[in-house]
Image (tube, grey):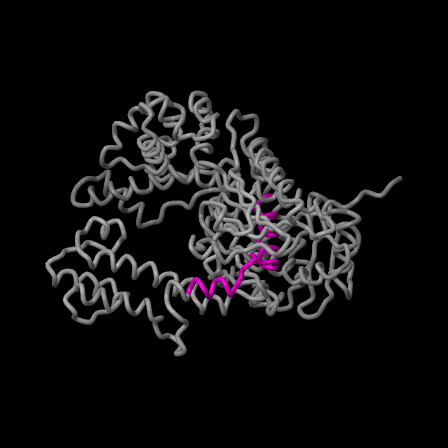
């Protein structure tokens, strides 16, 4: 009788060195046989990946996968790992689903809950470099002294599998399992993008900074010449009295001394002001932001070896969107994208989902009329032709207002038109808003739960119903939560879709290795992906992105008529993609 290939393999690297321990598992989490100890963990993992393609189980990608990546890449012909179960990410999803949103999610915290021990608080996020330096140290895993990390991984994984099986309703259970798999796949992709890095030409970056800001100051902390010049001109335009343009309070005071009352220094408010200092302040803010967030200090810290190595935090935002651990990975200014240049003979394949959130709303609500409208290319233009006499701006404002809960200004009539023509879509977001206003929980398509209301919110909400002095403040609070839950169901479901896109694309790219090298993901931002690919395979990569988007749509929304088109460009420079 042929032996059954194990579905999963738990993995625990040694605290220091190249070895580690492995244990085969059944899909249920039950251990199979005895643990395996190896002195060359990366080589053993590569052999098992090639032979069995298991789902790897570890405390977190930072502790289990990141230390292996350099060695896996050095192994001739070794493939990166295809699937994993990230205990830390899965624990966070399950805790939220069970009404324990925000509880500590480390391996040690999950272990403590299993054994009725004091639960340690989560430590601050660390990047891949720190993860390697503190690999499986007690202060990272949060396990009690003397606890066997492999035993903890096996026990927590088995408990998570039990909790997943306990989710009520087969459709809900299947979708949540897809969320678990996609979130874990995101951890693999994030680790690989940090390791590979986004192509970044520091000489181009330096030239751009010099053009915008002036030469790099010789004195650390000094302002570049052009930034200092704008600061002086701003002070002169406001009477010549010195003030700190980075101080919100001092800027407001300087304008007030010239008889100009500002509520804030937001760009939209400054643009409405007819005074030369307004444009100077806008310019100063733009240059100062580039200098502080992506200037020479950023280059020294984040760009090395011709690559920008971002550090993503998977699920770092409550909606499931990613965050970053510094470095501004999700906010590369458009002008600095000129420094993102493909290697010679390679191309950047840049793709983003067109009008993703409105299409997600259409698929979620099952609104057949809006699906017909969205069937073409430009959803807003199609909506304008059907409902707003060809006025695209009105169509866009109305639909965004419905998704984000905006009711002020002239948007009321636009919403009324949408309610009349698309009652299912409008009813979907309004029901989510009512749930939020009542203190309820909403979820994404795959089952990611929103945070519950705070005790302070509950007190304010009670004041809103009781009347009196707190009624107005309580009403504002309940409406604000309604706007949050209204958008959460859309944004979190869009994050579900984007995760599935990323996982499907990553799997396809792994099968495309050619003589010039393997195309690989180098950037991900909400609904946008960038692949660095040999020039000869760039068009094929573009086709794979479209196929991955179609797969993600089927996985998340099933048999829906809603299409999720990808806008794709093959370029040498990132700035040329849009």
**Residue 186 is one of the magenta-drawn residues:** yes
**Residue 436 is one of the magenta-drawn residues:** no
Image coordinates of residue 542 in percent, x first then y, are 60, 40
Question: What residue is rendered at 41% in x and 62% in y?
Answer: 293
Q: Which residues are magenta?
A: 181-209
Question: What residue is rendered at 49% in x and 48% in y?
Answer: 576
Q: Does residue 467 appear to the left or right of 185 in the view shown?
A: left
- Residue 224 in sight from this viewpoint: yes
Closest to the observer, 269 or 143: 269
Q: Does residue 26 appear to the left or right of 129 in the view shown?
A: right
Q: Name the residue furthest left.
A: 259
Q: Is residue 364 above or below residue 5?
A: above
Closest to the observer, 445 or 569: 569
Count all numbered tags in the image, as a single digit.
Answer: 0
Closest to the observer, 142 or 202: 202
- Residue 173 in sight from this viewpoint: no
Image coordinates of residue 483 in percent, x first then y, are 33, 39
Image coordinates of residue 254 in percent, x first then y, are 17, 64
Q: Does residue 162 appear to the left or right of 22 in the view shown?
A: left
Quadrant of the snapshot with the N terminus: top right
Q: Name the residue furthest right.
A: 1
Q: Is residue 186 above or below residue 444?
A: below
Image coordinates of residue 502 in percent, x first then y, are 58, 44
Q: Does residue 357 appear to the left or right of 271 in the view shown?
A: right
Dominant secondary structure, magenta: helix
């Amino acid at each position: 009788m042929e032996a059954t290939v194990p579905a999963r393999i738990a993995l625990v690297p040694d605290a220091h060195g190249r070895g580690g321990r492995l244990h085969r598992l059944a899909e249920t989490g039950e251990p199979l046989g005895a643990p395996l100890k190896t002195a060359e963990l990366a080589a053993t993992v590569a052999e098992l990946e090639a032979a069995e393609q298991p789902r790897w189980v570890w405390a977190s990608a930072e502790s289990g996968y990141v230390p292996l990546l350099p060695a896996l890449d050095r192994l001739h012909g070794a493939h990166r790992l295809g699937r994993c179960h990230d205990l830390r990410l899965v624990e966070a999803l399950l805790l939220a689903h069970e009404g324990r949103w925000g509880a500590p999610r480390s391996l040690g915290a999950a272990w403590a809950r299993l054994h009725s021990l004091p639960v340690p608080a989560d430590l601050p996020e660390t990047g891949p470099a720190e993860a390697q330096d503190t690999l499986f140290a007690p202060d990272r895993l949060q396990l009690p002294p003397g606890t066997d990390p492999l035993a903890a991984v096996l026990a927590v994984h088995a408990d998570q599998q039990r909790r997943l099986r306990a989710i009520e309703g087969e459709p809900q259970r299947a979708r949540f399992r897809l969320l678990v798999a996609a979130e874990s796949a995101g951890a693999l992709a994030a680790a690989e993008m940090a390791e590979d890095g986004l192509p970044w030409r520091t000489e181009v970056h330096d030239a751009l900074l010099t053009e915008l800001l002036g030469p790099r100051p010789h004195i650390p902390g000094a302002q570049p010449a052009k930034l200092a010049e704008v600061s002086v001109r701003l002070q002169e335009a406001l009477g010549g009295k010195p003030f700190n343009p980075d101080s919100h309070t001092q800027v407001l005071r300087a304008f007030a001394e010239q008889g100009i009352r500002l509520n804030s220094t937001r760009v939209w408010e400054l643009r409405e002001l007819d005074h030369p200092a307004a444009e100077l302040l806008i310019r100063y803010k733009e240059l100062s932001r580039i200098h502080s967030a992506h200037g020479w200090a950023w280059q020294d810290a984040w760009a090395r070896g011709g690559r920008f190595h971002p550090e993503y935090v998977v699920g770092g935002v409550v909606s499931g969107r990613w965050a970053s651990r510094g470095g501004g990975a999700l906010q590369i200014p458009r002008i600095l994208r000129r420094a993102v240049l493909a290697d010679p003979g390679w191309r950047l394949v840049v793709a983003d989902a067109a009008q993703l959130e409105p299409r997600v709303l259409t698929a979620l609500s099952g609104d057949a009329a809006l699906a017909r409208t969205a069937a073409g290319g430009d959803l807003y233009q199609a909506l304008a032709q059907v409902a707003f006499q060809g006025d695209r701006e009105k169509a866009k404002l109305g639909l965004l207002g419905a998704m984000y809960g905006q009711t002020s200004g002239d948007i009321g009539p636009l919403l009324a038109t949408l309610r009349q023509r698309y009652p299912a879509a409008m009813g979907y977001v309004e029901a989510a808003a009512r749930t939020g206003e009542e203190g309820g929980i909403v979820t994404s398509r795959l089952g990611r739960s929103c945070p519950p209301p705070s005790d302070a919110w509950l007190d304010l909400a009670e004041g809103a119903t009781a009347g009196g002095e707190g009624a107005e403040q309580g009403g504002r609070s309940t409406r604000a939560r309604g706007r949050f839950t209204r958008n959460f169901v859309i944004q979190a479901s869009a994050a579900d879709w984007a995760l599935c896109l990323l996982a499907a694309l990553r799997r396809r790219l792994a099968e495309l290795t050619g003589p010039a090298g393997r195309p690989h993901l180098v950037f991900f931002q909400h609904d946008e992906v960038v692949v660095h690919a040999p020039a000869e395979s760039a068009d094929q990569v573009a086709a794979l992105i479209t196929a991955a988007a179609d797969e993600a749509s089927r996985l998340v929304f099933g048999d829906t008529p809603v299409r999720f088109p990808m806008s794709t460009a093959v370029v040498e420079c990132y700035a040329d993609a849009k």
